[in-house]
Structures are given as C-alpha cells and as structure tokens.
Amino acid sequence: MVKFGPAGNCESFYASGHKQTIEAAKWLKELGLDLFEYSFGKGITLSDSTAIAIGEEMKKYGIEISVHAPYFINFATPTEEQAEKSIMYVINSIYKLRLLGGTKLVVHPASCGKMSREEAIKLTTDRLKQLATVLHEHPEYSDIRVCLETMGKQAQIGTYREIIEFCKLSDQFIPTFDFGHINALGQGCLKTKQDYMDIFNLAIKELGFDKINSCHIHFSKIEYGAKGEIKHLTLVDNVFGPEFQPLAEAIIELGINPTIICESRGIMAVDALKMKNIYLECLNRI
C-alpha cells in the first residue's frame, strides 16, 4: 500500500488551533493521510517520554512514522572523530525512532567540503561500512531501515546513482528518492513517466525489487540554479518541477509500495493530500 504524509507540521495544523506534534496523528487521520515524518534536523532534543506518547498516538490512529536524522551528519568528514559522531547521531536517532514506533530513518550522506568528489565518495563508503557493522552489533534494530537520501546540490554527496551504490553496503540501507532534489540537481531532468521509470528500473536492477518496493520518497517542487537546489516550493508552482502525476503513473506501473513524504514549503499536509488524490485518480483509471 502506497502511503502519503507530511514532513512535520504545516501551517494549517497550527492555524486550526493545534500546538503539539502529539495532536498530529488524529488531525492527519481525519485529513485522510497515512504518514508523518518527524525531524531531528537541528538536533535530537525529543524526550523519551514524549517520543513514546507521540508513538502511541500514531499507532492509535494508524499513522506510520518516519524520522529524519540530523542534517549535520557527514560521512565524508576528514576526521575519524567527527565520523564516529555521525555514526552515533544515526544510532541515537534510531533509538528515538524505535520509541516513536517507526522503522525508517532518513539520512543525508555527506558533503564534499574541500576534497574532491572521488575522495568524498570513498570516505562516505568506508564510513557507511562502519555504520553497517555497528548496526549488525545491535540485533534489536534489525528491522530498522536507514534511508539514504538523494541530495540536490552539487557540493553534496548523493546523486541517485551514488545512493544506489551506497545501498549495496547493507541489507538495512534503502534509498530515499527525493525527486525534487534529483530534478534540481539535474536542472529539470524529470519531465515524463519514463524519466522516473529509468531511475526506478536502474535501482531495481542493482538493488532488487524488495528494496525499491519499500523505498522512501520525498517529493516537492524545488527552485534551482546552476549549483542545484535553492528552496522548496509548493505544487501550484508552474515554473520549476517536477510534476507528481508522472511519478504516480510510474509507481503504479511498477507495482511498488513506497512511503511518500511531501516537503512542500509550509503546506506539506495540504500538498500530501493532493498527491494522494492524484495517485488514486491514476489508479482508478486502470
């Protein structure tokens, strides 16, 4: 089953009088959505008791939850000390994810910094192997999937081809295809169903159907420049892409069941519902 939801709480959530994420589950259920992504982007500050309470509400209303690990994780850092910290940020995020009742953790792989892309990719690969070893030492986390995200800027590590290669390093690594990022990095490369199909088919060939069947997706339209991503937009934007309908058609044709998180600027839940309705319309036409 393909599921849809927002990355965090949107403007309409607060406008309707809600103040805390623990209230989001019932609100999302009533809206007709199925997912919620909690962000530790700026750091892991969520208390254990609050995580448990939020998780109980999500379970009560049938909302699947994922977590975004801190943005400052960088597996291409030149120092081993910082690399070890990045690994611990992942493990600590997984601990909170477990309390929230989720199994998918989204992770930004790395940035190049001052090194060459080749050097950064090698470091990232080595550190992800270390992370895979650490995860293997925690059998209680065997059902957790680390969802390595495609990135949208030239200075970042994480083209969809790089992510596919990284996901070969562990059975617990699966892709987060951020199609707004892919489109921004590719200067508007996603226009047709076939453009999406080509990415999925390569991933299925290299990683197997099961990993792609359960892959994670981020979607929003994104303004981009010569160096890639500039800022997130909403679905009504008619200058920058990508469009969601061709992606919906590709998902249906392939018969995969990803979790799809909307990252539209400010109105994530509103646009997530639009995306779900587009998907259902495409499905009903078959």
Image (tube, rainbow, N blue to C red):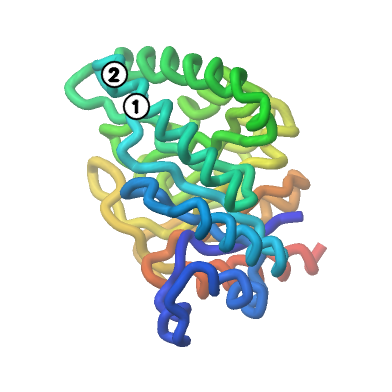
- Between 125 and 17, which is closer to the camera in this rendering? 17
Residue 113 got which mark? none
Picture coordinates of residue 211 (x, y %)?
68, 33
Looking at the picture, does residue 37 appear above or below residue 158? below
Q: Left or right? Give the position of 197 relative to 131.
A: right
In this view, the residue farthest toward the bottom is: 16
- Between 245 and 152, which is closer to the camera in this rendering? 152
User: Mark 1 and 2 residues: CB-CB less than 8 Å, in contact?
Assistant: yes
Q: Quadrant of the N terminus?
A: bottom right
Residue 85 got which mark? 1
Q: Quadrant of the C terminus?
A: bottom right
Q: Is residue 245 visible?
A: no
Picture coordinates of residue 175 (x, y %)?
56, 36
Q: Residues within 10 Å of mark 1 (few under 14, many from 20)?
A: some
Query: What is the three-letter code of the residue carrying label 1?
Result: Lys
Picture coordinates of residue 152 (x, y %)?
36, 42
Looking at the picture, does residue 234 appear above or below residue 206? below
- Between 237 and 210, which is closer to the camera in this rendering? 210
In this view, the residue farthest toward the left is: 114
Q: Residue sitting at 59 percent across and 48 percent down?
A: 99
Q: Residue sitting at 43 percent across and 13 percent down?
A: 126
Q: Residue sitting at 58 percent across and 52 percent down?
A: 100
Q: Classify mark 2: helix, strand or loop.
A: helix
Picture coordinates of residue 51 (x, y %)?
53, 55
Looking at the picture, does residue 37 appear above or below residue 111? below
Q: Classify mark 1: helix, strand or loop.
A: helix
- Residue at the disc numbered 2: 81
Q: Residue sitting at 47 percent across and 86 percent down?
A: 16
Q: Residues within 10 Å of mark 2 (few under 14, many from 20)?
A: few
Name the quadrant containing residue 118: top left
Query: What is the three-letter code of the residue carrying label 2?
Result: Glu
Give the alpha-carbon distance from disc 1 to disc 2, as whole Å. 6 Å
